[in-house]
Amino acid sequence: MLQGIFQGVLQSVLVAWSEVWWIVLPLVTFFIFWDFWLVYLHIRFVKAISWKLLEVKIPKNVLKTPKAMEQIFAAAHAPYSYGILKFDKYWKGKEESWMAFELIARAGESHFYMRLPKEMRHNMEAAVYGQYPEAEIMEVDDYLDHFPEVLPNQEIDISGFEEILRHENYLPIRTYLEFEDPTEERRLDTIAPIMEIMAKLRDDEQLWYQLVVRPTGEDFKKEGEKKINQIIGTESKNKSDGIFADFGLGVTLGEVVRAPFEHPGSAVKKKEEVAKTMRFLITPGEKDMTEAIEEKISKIAFEATPRFLYVTKQGSPDPGVIAAIHGFIRQFSTQNLNSLKPDGATTTASYSVRGMFKDTRIRWRKRAIYESYRHISPSEKKSVLNIEELASIYHFPSAAVSTTELEKIPSRRGSPPSGIPTIDD
């Protein structure tokens, strides 16, 4: 009996398939081809990029705040296209360009790098010199060339993670402005914790911090404005309020139905009165949130990927290093707004992987995050940070950071003062 039922169901499926295969099969084939086509366009775009690695050496006793770095990030937004044309995007494979700011600790020294397409070199050099005239920028050999293309291996082990926003993109994290003080002695440098971590690394350890940034548009700004309107009780105006709006009557269908009993304008007045009342009913926390959202969406922003890698010999990792990095990121967290958290899909920590084949899966995660670092790959999870937030989590240290392991320019460059006495030969 069961065999007969099975044969009947199978026959029905075959009959249905014979009727619709000419529709379903082309659709399935198209979507599969489309996915492969997008992957091909992305690979072609990435391979066409000519990357340059520039090391930035800063002078000692820099008194500038992260506000200077904020202007450098603003310059990095220059290549933004304000919307790529569909033809260029899906046929030519054009994408918004990106770059990376890196901080590397190795051999007892810390180094700042900019990894960028060669077309952006002059723009970024001008931006850095504009804020740090005494800085030195030079193209250097890639330190990644001293490492194999695949890690971990039998000699070298790595661990790491990427950071993403915990909540919506329009909610800000804690920025450097909350750490500043008019008195220089009381001013805190948010980059100091990670510099101290790097200063205490052993000779067989390296710590890599990579911040990948890609300019983005105003989508997060619109989301923030919508949230503000929701909090204060107002709604954005809709251009097509009702079926009669297109005919220029200025009333909605509901107002027409209620017209014999209520003047159409009275409903609008009631809505305005309710909105005004709601503005006075918001709590202090909601007021702080709206002000924070307005502050964040007022500045240009990037899709940002903070990425950390800890490189050491097999069998000798120090778990305290990863814990200290988490502490560095935690200082930018707030309970009522937003914070950065490790991306559970990229972290190589043992607690993040459960189930079967745990060791193999952790090894594959390590390999994946190492490849993402080498290829300067932006995260698929788009966390949006504005230039103020970026300058908080990455900037050149000020004079408050006095670690001796940071390689700096020993003295200012400059010509002799005018009028100095000379001796003729």
Image (tube, rainbow, N blue to C red):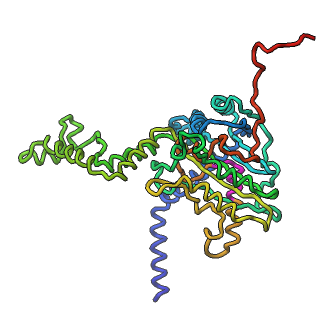
Q: Is residue 354 left or right of residue 199?
A: left
Q: Magenta includes 370?
A: yes
Q: Residue at x 70, y 45 (%)?
A: 402
Q: Which of 335 and 354 lies nearest the eye of the viewer?
A: 335
Q: Which of 394 and 192 lies nearest the eye of the viewer?
A: 192
- Image height of 5 relative to 354, above or below: below
- Residue 197 percent location from the top left of the image: 70, 55
Q: Residue at x 65, y 70 (%)?
A: 350
Of helix, strand and loop, which mostly describes the magenta segment?
helix
Q: Can see residue 357? A: yes
Q: Which of 245 and 416 lies nearest the eye of the viewer?
A: 416
- Residue 335 percent location from the top left of the image: 46, 57
Q: Which residues are magenta?
A: 368-377
The residue most toward the bottom is: 1
Answer with the quarter of the image where residue 414 lies: top right
The residue most toward the right is: 425
Q: Magenta includes 60?
A: no
- Residue 4 percent location from the top left of the image: 47, 85
* Numbered circles on residues, count: 0
Q: Residue at x 72, y 58 (%)?
A: 310
Q: Residue at x 88, y 12 (%)?
A: 423
Q: Which of 376 and 91 lies nearest the eye of the viewer?
A: 376
Answer with the quarter of the image where residue 367 lies: bottom right
The residue most toward the top is: 424
Q: Can see residue 100? A: no
- Residue 31 percent location from the top left of the image: 54, 54
* Image quadrant containing the C terminus: top right
